[in-house]
Amino acid sequence: MTSDTFVAPPAERAETRFGSGAIAMFVFLGISAVITIVASTEIADAVGFAAVLIGTMASGWLYLQRSRHLTGRERLGWSMIGAGLLIVAV
């Protein structure tokens, strides 16, 4: 056996387009950053906590969704990372 038998095939490259979910996350990130900078300490702490929580949940969900297009060990690995991020958010 050669080492090539254990390498997953390269994923097809798709043109990157930002969907409505990604645009909504960018807007949320921008609003959170502005509030964190200009608001009082108590409000900035609350908004920062919510932004990190929502960001972690969104990234975990995205890892899980994108891993569905992979095969073998790559799918398992990325699925575990996504699940771990969702567990951390909880």
Image: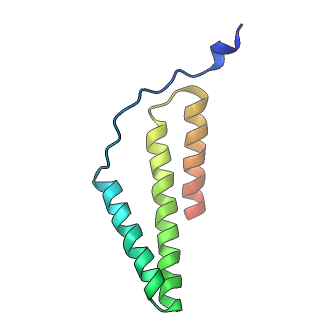
Using residue 8 as the reference point, say whether residue 26 is left or right of it: left
Q: 42 and 72: which one is in front?
A: 42
Residue 2, image x, y percentages: 70, 9
**Rendering quarter of residue 5:** top right
Q: Residue furthest top?
A: 1
Residue 23, image x, y percentages: 31, 58
Image quarter in which the C terminus is found: bottom right
Residue drawn 46% across the image and 66% down it: 54
Residue 10, image x, y percentages: 51, 24
Q: 23 and 60: which one is in front?
A: 23
Residue 77, image x, y percentages: 61, 38
Image quarter in which the N terminus is found: top right
Residue drawn 37% across the image and 62% down it: 26
Using residue 5 as the reference point, say whether residue 89 is left or right of it: left
Is residue 90 in view?
no
The vertical placement of 81 against 9, above or below, is below
Residue drawn 32% across the image and 49% down it: 18
Residue drawn 47% across the image and 81% down it: 36
Using residue 68 as the reference point, say whether residue 3 is left or right of it: right
**Rendering quarter of residue 75:** top right
How many marks can you see? 0
The vertical placement of 42 against 30, above or below, is below
Q: Residue furthest left?
A: 20
What sort of colour scheme is used for the picture?
A: rainbow
Is residue 18 in view?
yes
